Structures are given as C-alpha cells and as structure tokens.
Image (tube, grey):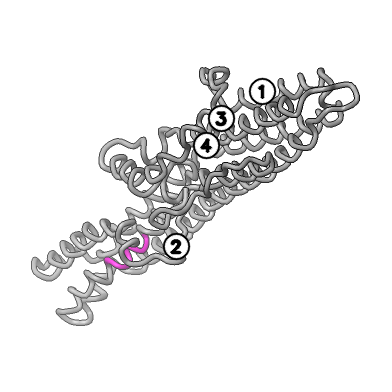
C-alpha cells in the first residue's frame, strides 16, 4: 500500500515514464512521414478515432472500477480478520480458567492460552505467505521483460523491503508445532483445525463450558470464512476477457491516435505538425496510465507496492493479542519504507 498523499514526478515516471519513449518515437515517425515524406494518405478522419477513444475510456473506467472492488474487498477481508482475532484473544484470555471441577495451575493455564494465541499468530503469517504465492496470471509470473520488471518491483518496492519481520524468538514461539501442519497442502487450514481440536479437548477436560466452546468454535469458523474469501480473490483472476480486451482496445486507439490528429495539427501551419508529437504523446500516455492503474489493481495479493498491507495488519493483530496475554516483549508496528507499507 502506497502511503504518500500524492505522487511526485519521480514516482510517476518510475511507474509509467518508460512508456513515454515509445510514444514519442511513434508520434515522431508519423509526423516525419506526413510532413517530410509527404505521406498525406496516413491521415484519417478524427471523428471515428474520437469515438473509439470515448469507448475505450468508458471500458477502462469499467475495468478500473472492478479492479478497485477487488482491492477494497481484500482490505475488508483483512479488516474482518482483525476484528475476529481480537475476539479470539479476549475469549482465550477470559474463558480458559479453572472451575469447581478443575485444578490446573496458573502456569498450566497460561501455557494453554499462549499455545492458542501463538498458534493463531502463526496462522496469520502462514495465510499471508500463502496469499503471496505467485499465480500464473500475476505480473511476477510473466515471461520476458514484463515479468522481470514486476519481480524487480517486488524486490525494490514491495515485499522485498520487508524480508526480516520476525526475529528468532518470535519464530520459536509461533512455529513451535510447525511439523504438525508444514506438510499440508493448505497449512493455514490445518492450523485452524488444530485450534479446534485443542478447544474440544479443553471442553472434555472441563476447562471450557460447552457454551463457551461453541462460541470459540464459531470464531474459528469465521476464520475459515475470512480465509476462503481471501483465497477466492487470489485464485480467481480478474476475467481475462475484460482485462485483455481493454489492453487491445487501448493499443488500437493509440495506434490510430496520431493518424487522426496529424491532419488537424497540420491546419495550424507547418509547425503544427510537430506540435502533434507532444500533445499526441500526452493523450496516449494518459490512456496507458489508466490501463496500468487497473492492471496493477487486479491482484491485491502479489507482493507489489499496490498490495493490501497484510504484513502491517498481521503485526497489529500480533501486538493486540500479546498485550491481551499481558506479555512484556511486544514487537513494534511495521513502519512504511520508501512510502510503502506492506
């Protein structure tokens, strides 16, 4: 997630500035061909080009709106995980206690609480890692230059900025029973299953009343629901017919753009043809940037700067749960790096 209030010129050119070069080159070729070579047949009426441009603008607007819905849905899912996690921490801390039929020591009760809280924190980080696993339609999985650029953006402006976010003690606490779920196809699912078995065992031992156990099982079911909704976004791509046709329509419009405006600028005189180069470049670049914004918003879990800040949310939950337990060593919140929060 990009946290700066506004983009400066450097950030804008880092995101889409490289597209200016080929746009300038294309506009220059058309201008030279029309003005110096006398290829007046290149010019086409502006009206059909403007109609295509209007249609493309509406189409890109629809695509970008749907892409934003995926981003916002991802953020709502993780917001729900925050709320359910806090409920889980409060329940673990208050429900697990002795009654008239049980006599566990305070140390034993605290070990049970820590196990349930630590395991939940491990679920958060495991779920995040699973959601960051690349799929074949994401940018980092592409071949050639596009994939290379995307992987570079991940490294220098995305998840690569936050590689060391857990110290050795945190890893030891949260992943002490990793062998019970590390070999599973879906580790996050197995962690919730272990939590459920633990809760059922506590009810059998009399530590938990049946009603309290059912309440805690309901929260675990909520975690499954949140996980499933996040996996739905991750594993179902933005429909390619919408995404790809938007790109194709954009290419058609940009190809026709200088052919449609060169004659219009020629009416301004000999110098007018050359004015077509900067103005045509600006118009074409605007459409390219609109396409890129939607393209990079389709997948909110791919490790790029435009992602949902899962790591920051995981750390926020971790801090809340450890403070509910009354622990002294509390990690610091994740801070933005280069105006990016992951």
Answer with mark 1 or mark 2, whichever residue precedes in sequence. 2
Answer with mark 2 or mark 3, whichever residue precedes in sequence. 2
Q: Residue drawn at (41%, 46%), measured in percent from left and top?
A: 304
Question: In the structure shown, which secondary structural element does the residue marked by tag 3 occupy?
Answer: helix
Q: Residue drawn at (33%, 41%), measured in percent from left and top?
A: 151
Give the magenta-colored segment's residue range.
Answer: 281-287
Write down the residue under mark 4.
128
- CB within 8 Å, label 2 to label 3: no
Question: In the structure shown, which secondary structural element does the residue marked by tag 1 occupy?
Answer: helix
| Mark 1 neighbour density, 10 Å: few (under 14) some (14–19) many (20 or more) | some
Answer with mark 3 or mark 4, whichever residue precedes in sequence. 4
| Mark 2 neighbour density, 10 Å: few (under 14) some (14–19) many (20 or more) | few
Left or right for 187, reference 50: right
Alpha-carbon distance for marks 2 and 3? Answer: 34 Å
Write down the residue under mark 3.
173
Q: Main secondary structure of the magenta part?
A: helix
Answer with mark 2 or mark 4, whichever residue precedes in sequence. 2
Question: In the structure shown, which secondary structural element does the residue marked by tag 2 occupy?
Answer: loop
Q: Residue drawn at (42%, 39%), measured in percent from left and top?
A: 164
User: Can see residue 244?
Assistant: no
Residue 188: give x, y in percent of width and height: 58, 28
Closest to the observer: 145 or 81? 81
Residue 295: give x, y in percent of width and height: 42, 49
Q: Is residue 285 magenta?
A: yes
Alpha-carbon distance for marks 1 and 2? Answer: 40 Å
Alpha-carbon distance for marks 2 and 4? Answer: 24 Å
Left or right for 47, reference 226: left
Write down the residue under mark 1.
193
């Amino acid at each position: 997630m990009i946290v700066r209030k506004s983009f400066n010129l450097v950030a804008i050119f880092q995101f889409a500035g490289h597209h200016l070069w080929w746009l300038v080159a294309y506009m220059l070729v058309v201008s030279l061909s029309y003005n110096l070579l006398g290829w007046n047949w290149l010019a086409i009426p502006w009206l059909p080009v403007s109609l295509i441009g209007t249609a493309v603008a509406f189409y890109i607007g629809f695509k970008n709106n749907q892409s934003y819905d995926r981003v916002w849905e991802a953020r709502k899912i993780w917001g729900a995980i925050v709320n359910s996690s806090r409920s889980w921490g409060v329940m673990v801390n208050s429900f697990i206690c002795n009654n008239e039929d049980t006599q566990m020591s305070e140390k034993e009760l605290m070990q049970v609480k820590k196990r349930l809280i630590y395991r939940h924190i491990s679920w958060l980080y495991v779920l995040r890692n699973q959601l960051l696993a690349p799929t074949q339609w994401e940018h980092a999985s592409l071949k050639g230059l596009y994939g290379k650029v995307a992987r570079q953006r991940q490294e220098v402006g995305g998840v690569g900025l936050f590689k060391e976010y857990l110290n050795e003690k945190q890893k030891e606490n949260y992943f002490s029973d990793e062998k019970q779920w590390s070999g599973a196809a879906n580790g996050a699912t197995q962690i919730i299953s272990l939590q459920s078995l633990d809760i059922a065992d506590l009810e059998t031992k009399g530590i938990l009343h049946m009603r309290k156990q059912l309440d805690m099982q309901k929260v675990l079911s909520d975690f499954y629901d949140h996980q499933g909704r996040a996996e739905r976004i991750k594993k179902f791509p933005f429909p390619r017919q919408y995404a790809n046709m938007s790109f194709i329509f954009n290419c058609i419009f940009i190809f026709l753009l200088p052919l449609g405006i060169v004659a219009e600028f020629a009416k301004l005189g000999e110098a007018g043809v050359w004015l077509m180069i900067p103005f045509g470049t600006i118009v074409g670049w605007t459409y390219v940037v609109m396409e890129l914004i939607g393209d990079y918003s389709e997948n909110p879990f791919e490790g790029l700067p435009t992602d949902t800040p899962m790591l920051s949310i995981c750390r926020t939950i971790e801090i809340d749960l450890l403070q509910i337990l009354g622990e002294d060593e509390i990690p610091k919140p994740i801070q933005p790096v280069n105006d990016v929060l992951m």
